[in-house]
Image (spheres, rainbow, N blue to C red):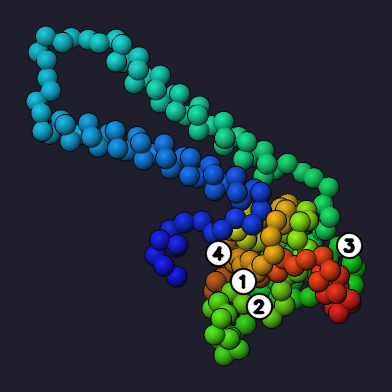
Amino acid sequence: MPTWSMLSFQDSASPVMEELSYFHDFTMLIIIMITTLVGVNMSLMFIYKMSDRYLLQNQLIEMIWTVAPVFVLFVIAVPSLKVLYLMDDPFSPNLTIKAIGHQWYWSYEYSDFPDIEFNSYMLPENDLNMSDSRLLETDNSLVVPVNSKIRVITTAADVIHSWTIPSMGVKADAVPGRLNQTMFSTTRTGMFYGQCSEICGANHSFMPIKMEVVPMNQFSNWLLTIE
């Protein structure tokens, strides 16, 4: 993977992740402008002797450097609140899945289909193909239909885990004895990977999440084969 690709977000696969990416780029643009301005001023201070022995006060510049940061924070806060609202905005889901974290694998239950439940273990390196991703492939994938609203209810059987898929913009802690929920919409087909984002023990990095987003007809066929 190229170095520059590792420094950026994964390609968005949900509306929430698209908004997160836009907000990240917008905020980084502001930070770059501020950093450039401060750097130029510091460079000029080293090059030129900018002093005035008769200057005692300048209330205008003091007002500017007090009001300007407040204005910048307000400009950042508005899109930030919008993204927070979209992330927590509940909707009527088309499919509900329960994800249960174990040491160190995931198990899934399709609440709308009581007979469908399975465990998802990481594939060992000996079973990987040339095109597979190391430490991310699983023996059973989470399959969901495209253009659907998905609700994932997370919990754990032993310690705290975290169900995370970056390209979907979702991250929810799985706490023993407690149910958390996260929601996302699928906008394109493909394979999407994630990992447990909580330090849950020695094999913390060996419980990946693999989700397949497929067309509705393929999802229906998958339901018939797994039931």
- Circle 2 SS class: loop
Mark 2 or mark 3: whose residue is earlier in sequence: 3
Which residue occupies the foreground of this view, 25 or 53?
Answer: 25
Mark 1 or mark 4: whose residue is earlier in sequence: 4
Q: CA distance from mark 4 to mark 2?
A: 20 Å
Which residue occupies the foreground of this view, 160 or 17?
Answer: 17
**Residue 201 coordinates in the image, percent (x, y):** 57, 70
Which quarter of the picture shows residue 221?
bottom right
Q: CA distance from mark 3 to mark 4?
A: 31 Å
Kindly identify the amino acid type of the residue bearing the numbered disc 4. Ile
**Residue drawn at x 71%, y 53% as measured from the top left:** 184
Q: Is residue 116 visible?
A: no
The residue pinned by badge 3 equals 112
Q: Is residue 28 above or below residue 120?
A: above
Q: Looking at the rendered structure, which numbered label has been put on residue 208?
A: 1
Q: Looking at the rendered structure, which numbered label has been put on residue 191?
A: none
- Circle 4 SS class: loop
Circle 2 crowding by C-alpha within 10 Å: few under 14, some 14–19, many from 20: many
Mark 1 or mark 3: whose residue is earlier in sequence: 3
Circle 4 crowding by C-alpha within 10 Å: few under 14, some 14–19, many from 20: few
Asked whether disc 2 touches disc 1, contact meaning CB atoms under 8 Å apart, the reply is: yes
